[in-house]
Image: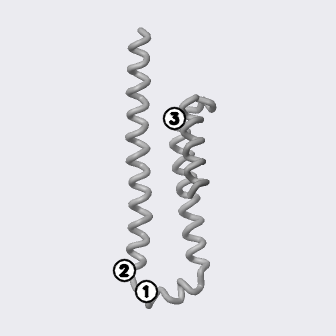
Amino acid sequence: MTKVLIAVALGVLVGHFNIMSVNPKKISKLTSLCLFIMLLAMGAQLGANDKLLGDLGRLGWQALVLAFASIVGSVLLVRLAENHISKQLEQSKQKAKRAIGH
């Protein structure tokens, strides 16, 4: 968990200090691509687990639906957070430009 928090903190610093001046749309696409790659890797790991697949009938569809709903919910919440943060950043940039007089 510490590694994840450090990675997020470093990302915030990179974005805040504009260390990598990249178009926000490119960042959004990269974020989505990385998220889908992560989900693909998780699915592959689950699919490779013979014990899990063998017990799937015993575990029932409820477990499968719960796992799928968790993934979909995570993706949707990340998208919502991404959109909200992007809008807030854009508003902040516009306010800063108005304050400077551009």
Amino acid residing under circle 3: Pro
Q: Name the residue under label 1.
A: 59
Amino acid residing under circle 2: Gln
Q: Mark 3 points at which residue?
A: 24
Q: Quadrant of residue 60?
A: bottom left
Q: Residue furthest top?
A: 101
Amino acid residing under circle 1: Leu
Task: Please name the residue shown 44% across and 24% down the image.
Answer: 93
Q: Nearer the viewer, residue 81 or 34?
A: 81
| Secondary-structure class at tag 3 | helix
Q: Looking at the image, what colour scheme do you see? A: one colour
Q: In which quarter of the image is residue 41?
A: bottom right
Q: Considering only order in the chain, which callout, 3 or 1, is on the residue closer to the N terminus? A: 3
Q: Distance between the residues labelled 2 and 3?
A: 39 Å
Dot 3 crowding, Cα within 10 Å, few <14, some 14–19, many 20+: few
Q: Considering only order in the chain, which callout, 3 or 2, is on the residue closer to the N terminus? A: 3
Dot 2 crowding, Cα within 10 Å, few <14, some 14–19, many 20+: few
Where is residue 74? Give x, y as percent: 43, 58
Task: Please name the residue shown 42% across and 69% down the image.
Answer: 68
Where is residue 52? Give x, y as percent: 53, 83
Task: Please name the residue shown 55% across and 50% down the image.
Answer: 5
* Quadrant of the image containing the C terminus: top left
Where is residue 51? Give x, y as percent: 57, 86
Q: Mark 2 points at which residue?
A: 62
Task: Please name the residue shown 41% across and 39% down the image.
Answer: 85
Q: Quadrant of residue 37?
A: bottom right
Q: Nearer the viewer, residue 12 or 75?
A: 12
Could you tell me if the residues under marks 2 and 3 are in contact, i.e. CB atoms within 8 Å? Answer: no
| Secondary-structure class at tag 2 | helix
Could you tell me if the residues under marks 1 and 2 are in contact, i.e. CB atoms within 8 Å? Answer: yes
